[in-house]
Image: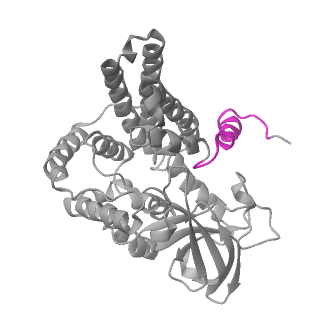
Amino acid sequence: MDLSHSPEEEEFRARLRQWLDRVLPTLPPKPPPDDWPGRRAYDMGWQRMLYDAGYADVHWDASPTTRLIFLEETEEAGAPYVGAGFVGLLHAGPTIAAEGSVEQRARWLPPILRGEEVWCQGFSEPDAGSDLAALRTRARRDGDEYVVSGSKIWTSHAEVADWCELLVRTDPAAAKHRGITWLALPMDAPGITVRPLRTLVGSAEFAEVFLDEVRVPVGNRVGDENDGWRVTMVTLSFERGTAFVGEVVACRRVLRELAGEARKNGRWDEPELRRRLGRLNAEFRALWRLTQWNVSEAEASGGVPGVGGSVFKLRYSQARQELYDAAADVLGPDALDLDRPWVLDRLSSLSYTIAAGTSQIQQNIVAERILGLPKGR
């Protein structure tokens, strides 16, 4: 395992820093959180700038180490987050790059990179809970099309998406992990109804999606029919292994800001708070090293993150919640003021032990696939 950077990688870092210093002051103001058409335009405009500068392909055409450097530098510089491009750039895109045909890669990857098309994720279902393989949305084959009926929930960015990475059951008689297929669903197809869901923090980046006899070309299938669970594991390895990397950098920045705020408001004089912030600093430094380790392992195995991503996701989710609990201690009574920094972040952090696979699911993965423990009966 090699955690050092080559001269070429350090040259990439320096060039990227110079570009960020030049372009970030030219960006327009960010739209408010509830203006999703405006946020889509803003996020896709940033992605187009990355594309024009030659940085858009780092999410799947660059080495994992280069991708890590990119995420680290853009977050440290305060560059826009991927936003509405999250699913396309960090989930669907890498999956298609790894599993799609030549024709599929040519059709779907360039528009994602150019900021022209937005993807959403149609995995979770209302009655499946954490058991993703218990999905019941059906797809029956009708010639050169699948006819899809069912519903999805917590569908990220569905209200502004052009495409959906959709999991469907194509063989109801098969064992539940074996009868699943991964489809690319055009969101303008007849029979689709989208109902936004409002979260605890007042935003609506998720939606319910209802599918009523929606026709999807067989050519939109990524991987073989009934092989969707394996393809999904590729998607989830990206989601848990590298999609949160930039957020670790952001948390380290927030930790520095919290220490500065504590010094200003007098809370720094409390030994227990200092110890708490110090432990969190060690926690996020360790998470960053774990990220580097996971990336190094991915680089040695063809670029797809392994099950070590579940270790990262498990601990990062908890550490993020602990970070914003510490922020509430630093703020004191102001932690009830929704206009203060970190307050809404604290509310959103509550979802992290559920999103991208619950902590209980991650514990099972670690137990079974890393420690080799037997499955529960």
Residue 175: image location, x then y, percent = 80, 62
Q: Tell me, what colour scheme is on the image?
A: one colour
Identify whether 41 is placed above or below 53: below
Residue 78: image location, x then y, percent = 28, 44
What span is in magenta? 355-375
Question: Is residue 269 visible to us here?
Answer: yes
Residue 27: image location, x then y, percent = 20, 56
In the rendered image, residue 86 lying in the magenta stretch gets the answer no
Q: Is residue 54 left or right of residue 184?
A: left
Report the residue at 41% width, 76% height from top. Answer: 107
- Quadrant where the C terminus sits is top right
Q: Residue 149 is drawn in which quadrant?
A: bottom right
Total numbered circles: 0
**Closer-to-camera residue (83/222):** 83
Q: Residue furthest bottom?
A: 143
**Closer-to-camera residue (115/301):** 115
- Quadrant where the N terminus sits is top left
Identify whether 11 is placed above or below 132: above
Question: Is residue 222 visible to us here?
Answer: no
Report the residue at 33% width, 54% height from top. Answer: 58
